[in-house]
Amino acid sequence: QVQLVESGGGLVQAGNSLRLSCAASGGTFSSYSLGWFRQAPGQEREFVAAISRSGGRTSYPASAKGRFTISRDNAKNTVYLQMNSLKPEDTAGYYCAASFLLGPLADHRQYAYWGRGTQVTVSS
């Protein structure tokens, strides 16, 4: 069983940055690929970033490319999401997810484990 705990969310002004962290426990961290998703009230869950088991490959949607960076530290069992140039439309709950598939994976249905999320609010 894999447990994921996100942290680092908060309230920021547009244009600023935040770094989210997701600490994992259970299983072997390097054996699963990881992703970040977000969901705003009344909206569907949206893919934000994903990284392969080794960290050698990443994937982003157009909305995140160039602003967000996913990385992982297999020694610390932690995955990060660096978010720069934040916009009010980035406001959402951000969730970390893990899959035993190779990755990177953009489809939330391919992830078996999820954290409880951390809220990011971007003011204009």
Image (cartoon, rainbow, N blue to C red):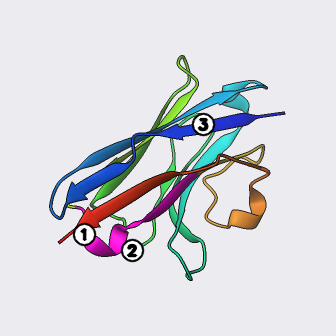
Q: Which residue is drawn at 34% across and 64% down?
A: 65
The three-letter code of the residue at mark 1 reads Lys
In the figure, 16 relative to 52: above or below? below
Q: Foreground: 32 or 120?
A: 120
* Amino acid tagged 3: Val
Image position of 2 with respect to 73: above or below: below
Is residue 66 located in the magenta-colored stretch of the structure? no
Residue position marked by numbered label 1 in the rendering: 87
What residue is shown at x 64% (from left), y 58% (from top)?
Answer: 105
| Secondary-structure class at tag 2 | loop
Is the C-beta separation of discs 2 and 3 under 8 Å?
A: no
Q: Is residue 84 visible?
A: no
Q: Mark 2 points at which residue?
A: 62
Question: What amino acid does circle 2 point to?
Answer: Ala
Disc 3 versus disc 1: distance between alpha carbons?
A: 24 Å
Disc nearest the viewer among 2 and 1: 1
The image shows residue 80 at horizontal and vertical percentages of: 44, 39
Outermost residue on the right side: it is 1
In the rendered image, which residue does mark 3 sit on? 5
In the drawing, does residue 64 fall left or right of residue 73?
left
Task: Give the extent of the magenta segment.
Answer: 86-95
Front disc: 2 or 3: 3
